[in-house]
Structures are given as structure tokens and as C-alpha cells.
Image (tube, rainbow, N blue to C red):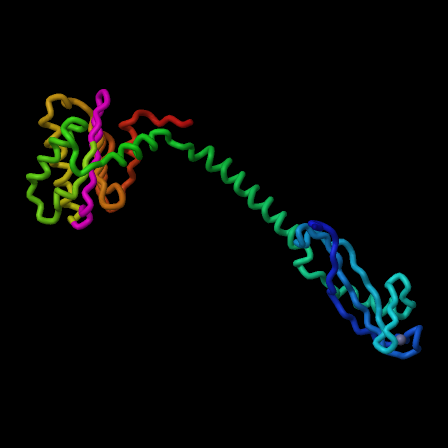
Amino acid sequence: MIIFGSRGSKIADLDVKGTTCSHCGQSDTQKVHVYGRYFHIFWIPFLTIGKKVYSECSHCKKTIEEESFPKELKQQYDAQSQNVKRPLWHSLGCLGFVGIIGVNIILALGALIWGTTKEPDTRDALYRADLSKLVSTPSFESDSLSFKLKSSFDKMDASMLDPLTFEYFAKVENEKVLFLMKVPDLKKVPKEKREVVTNIVNKFLDRQEGLKGKKRYIGIHGKYNMMMVNTPDTQENGNLVASLPLLDFYGEKKTK
Ligand SMILES: [Zn+2]
């Protein structure tokens, strides 16, 4: 199988005027044909490699190669040859190759710029892992805080929210406590009334003797995203709030 080589395709037929065929003596019977040759790899044109030009007499079919053109035929051809353009596809592969290099340079530059300004936050993975542990029925053995908090919520009087759909996750580490909750219908509650959820969490935490003086990192997740974030430094309440302040629970920002 031939996977590379050269091929040609016709790129122009030029009418020439005022020439006489040296073979049969007829006038205005010659045409100049121009073939463009290109180098191909797997039949994808890669590079243009010169032209093949010859004339043909429509009367006697005599062909003459460009090198042997009589003076007047050569003049006629030269006058028109500037207008003969190679089709772009003759260097398709080359353009593609340049394009691929260009894209890679942009990607590399992008990685360089973004890589230095947006270093991955290693705390993010810890947060995501904890967020995936939210459950609607926490057990006393594995998460006693969530278990007890759930009973507080189950008793809550909220016409717009169904406590049975709530999910919980709690974690205590050193002097900090993390409380993540998912309230799928939180968006249905007017923004100013959503504080009722964090108030219940805070009152519950106030009653826990063992948690006295610990910093609280409370995140209330809606159906799709974080909607309320309460940390020692931040109080956020909205339809979409950044979970970034919660990452402080895991310590100072460390990057790989
Ligand atoms: Zn002829």
C-alpha cells in the first residue's frame, strides 16, 4: 500500500489566442493545461510541489510540454499564468498541521497562565468527598450529631419544607465543626425566611456541650448547589453561593 507520494490534479485550462500549431498549422486551436502536483500522506494533500504545464491542439491532439513552448505560446501562457491559483486543498494537510501546532501552543500558554494563577486547591477534594456523604437518615453510630439534628428538624414547623427530604453530614475536627445539609426545596422558601434553617442548626449546636467554642462551618445545599454558607468569616444567603469559605474547615489553602 502506498501511503505517501505525489499526485496531481488539473488546476486550470487556459485558452490562448493568436498561436499556430507547429504540427498541423491550425490557428487558435491550442489550449494550455496546468496540473498542480502535491505531496500526499494517506492521500491527504500535504505540500504543493510544482506544476506540470502543457499545451494541446484541439485539431491534431499534439501536446507540447512547457519547456518546448514556441515563443508566442510561451508569451500567451506567461501573461495568464499569474491568474492560475492553486486550490487551498492542495496544502490541506499542511494547514491542518500548522493548525494543530497553533492550538497546542495556545493550550500550552493557557496551561502556563492558568496553571500559575489557578493552582488546584487540595481542600476541594476533601470537601467534595464530605459533600457526597450526605444522607437523609444518619445513624447515631456513624454520625450522632446529624442523627440528633435530624430529630430537631423533624419536629420543625415549616409548611414549605418537608424534613423527610433533608440530608445531613457532620464532622468535628479539633476546634472546628462542619455541618453540611441538603434542603432540596429551599428555593421555594423566600430568601429572607431561609435563615430559619441555619437558626435551627445554630441553636442545636449551642446546646451541644462538647462543641462549645468550636468554630462553625455550616453549608446548606439546595437541590443543585450551595445556597447558604455560614462560617466565622462569611454569611452568605442566595440562590447560588460559593462553597469556598467552607474549605477553611480543612485548614489553610495548600496546593500541590
Ligand atoms: Zn495541431
Decide which of 34, 220 is in the foreground and name it.
34
For residue 115, above or below residue 41: above
Location of residue 256 in the rendering, given as x and y in whole percent from the top left corner: 42, 27
Location of residue 170 in the rendering, given as x and y in whole percent from the top left corner: 20, 30
Location of residue 226 in the rendering, given as x and y in whole percent from the top left corner: 25, 41
For residue 82, above or below residue 169: below
Q: What is the quadrant of residue 174 in the picture? A: top left
For residue 119, above or below residue 12: above
In the image, 206: left or right of 32? left
Residue 235 visible at all: no
Q: What is the quadrant of residue 244 in the picture? A: top left
Decide which of 37, 156 is in the foreground and name it.
37
In the image, 97: left or right of 77? left
Q: Residue furthest front?
A: 1
> What number of labels is visible?
0
Residue at x 15%, y 23% (from the top left corner): 211
Magenta segment boundaries in residue numbering: 170-188
Residue 117 visible at all: yes
Decide which of 164, 20 is in the foreground and name it.
164
Q: What is the quadrant of residue 80 in the picture? A: bottom right
As for residue 184 lying within the magenta part, the answer is yes
Residue at x 23%, y 23% (from the top left corner): 173
Location of residue 145 in the rendering, given as x and y in whole percent from the top left corner: 15, 29
Residue at x 83%, y 76% (from the top left corner): 58
As for residue 174 lying within the magenta part, the answer is yes
Residue at x 46%, y 37% (from the top left corner): 114
Ligand 1 shown in quarter: bottom right
